[in-house]
Amino acid sequence: MTTPFGVQPISHVAQIGISIEPLQQLKLQTPITTSTPSNMDSFMEFTNKMLENFVNYICSFAVAPNQITPNTSENFIPINTVQQWYLNFQRRLQQNPNFWKS
């Protein structure tokens, strides 16, 4: 069975693991309170995660040029163009987190 371009087969398999530990053992597993939180503010963190998600999503549809079926109603964008946009956006965001407002 073949799937159309860009359509991924759906998997309905999940696995959950449960560990039963004595309470004394759990007390030893509490988070370290001396850890330092991220220096990145929540907007920057959200933006970086959103960009990574977008690029990963787009890249998941990548195919070799010989796998592209010609279709006059679709446009194709090279993956390296998306990746370059991502790097440029990240650089500009680091320089000025509000650049996108202008």
Image: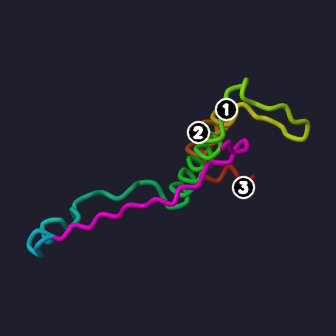
Residue 91: assigned label: 2
In percent of width and height, residue 2 lies at: 68, 42
Look at label 2 and name its amino acid.
Answer: Arg
Residue 81: assigned label: none
Dot 2 or dot 1, earlier in sequence: 1
Residue 101: assigned label: 3
The residue at 58%/42% (across/down) is: 90
Q: Quadrant of the N terminus?
A: top right
Boundaries of the magenta span: 1-20
Distance from the alpha carbon under mark 2 to that under mark 1: 28 Å
Pointer 1 local density, CA inside 10 Å: few below 14, some 14–19, many at least 20: few
Dot 3 or dot 2, earlier in sequence: 2
Q: Which residue is mark 1?
A: 63
Foreground: disc 2 or disc 1 = 1
View extreme (front): residue:
1
Res 34 quadrant in image: bottom left
Dot 3 or dot 1, earlier in sequence: 1
| Dot 2 and dot 1 residues touching (CB under 8 Å) | no
Q: Nearer the viewer, residue 13 or 37?
A: 13
The residue at 65%/33% (across/down) is: 84
